[in-house]
Image: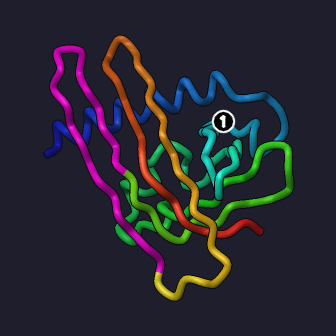
């Protein structure tokens, strides 16, 4: 399991490096050192967001037994809107160059979820010399 975690972390870091390199430069939150850019489809429309809370690269979640970093807000790029997640149904996969695949499913939800929720789907696949990383699933929350 530790080997799997290391491979998944390596895949996430590789994807994050691509996201940071591809993202726009500028003021916070998009200019943050550990910013992670992605496009989600929320209620049928594409939304470009950046997540940079919780150390931006998963360290906050991995080192925090309460898992608060799981619910880091996503800032809508070019807007003052913020997406506050309340539940996740996400599958992380990493396939090595020799074809070995490691998968981790994360289904978590906050208690006492407020009304007025939006569901966003995420489908990201990135390939590097180290392998292929994918992040697929849904995130539910609300825009404020």
Establish if 20 lies above or below 72.
above
Between 59 and 137, the one nearer to me in the picture:
137
Establish if 66 lies above or below 113.
above
* Colouring scheme applied when the structure was drawn: rainbow
| Left or right of 31 on screen, residue 41 | left
| Left or right of 27 on screen, residue 1 | left
Between 51 and 90, the one nearer to me in the picture:
90
- The question of residue 28 being in magenta is answered with no
The image position of residue 83, as x and y in percent, is 68, 61
Q: Which residues are magenta?
A: 91-110
Q: Identify the image quadrant of residue 61.
A: bottom left
Q: Residue at x 57, y 65 (%)?
A: 85
| Left or right of 20 on screen, residue 132 | left
The image position of residue 113, as x and y in percent, is 55, 83
Q: Pointer 1: residues within 10 angstroms few (<14), some, or many (20+)?
A: few
Q: Residue at x 61, y 84 (%)?
A: 114
Dominant secondary structure (helix, strand or loop) of the stretch shown in magenta: strand
The image position of residue 136, as x and y in percent, is 42, 44
Count the numbered circles shown: 1
Q: Residue at x 35, y 11 (%)?
A: 129
- Assign a secondary structure to mark 1: loop
Establish if 129 lies above or below 122.
above
Q: Which residue is mark 1?
A: 33
- Quarter of the image for the C terminus: give it: bottom right
Q: Identify the image quadrant of residue 84.
A: bottom right
The image position of residue 3, as x and y in percent, is 16, 37
- Quarter of the image for the N terminus: give it: top left
């Amino acid at each position: 399991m530790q080997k799997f975690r290391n491979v998944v972390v390596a895949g996430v870091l590789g994807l994050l490096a691509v996201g940071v390199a591809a993202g726009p430069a500028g003021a916070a939150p998009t200019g943050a050192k550990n910013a992670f850019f992605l496009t989600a489809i929320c209620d049928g429309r594409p939304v470009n967001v950046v997540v940079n809370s919780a150390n931006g690269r998963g360290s906050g979640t991995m080192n925090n037994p309460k898992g608060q970093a799981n619910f880091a807000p996503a800032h809508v790029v070019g807007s003052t809107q913020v997406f506050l997640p309340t539940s996740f149904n996400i599958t992380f996969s990493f396939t090595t160059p020799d074809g070995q695949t490691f998968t981790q499913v994360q289904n978590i939800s906050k208690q006492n979820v407020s009304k007025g929720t939006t569901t966003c789907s995420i489908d990201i696949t990135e390939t590097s010399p180290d392998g292929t990383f994918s992040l697929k699933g849904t995130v539910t929350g609300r825009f404020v």
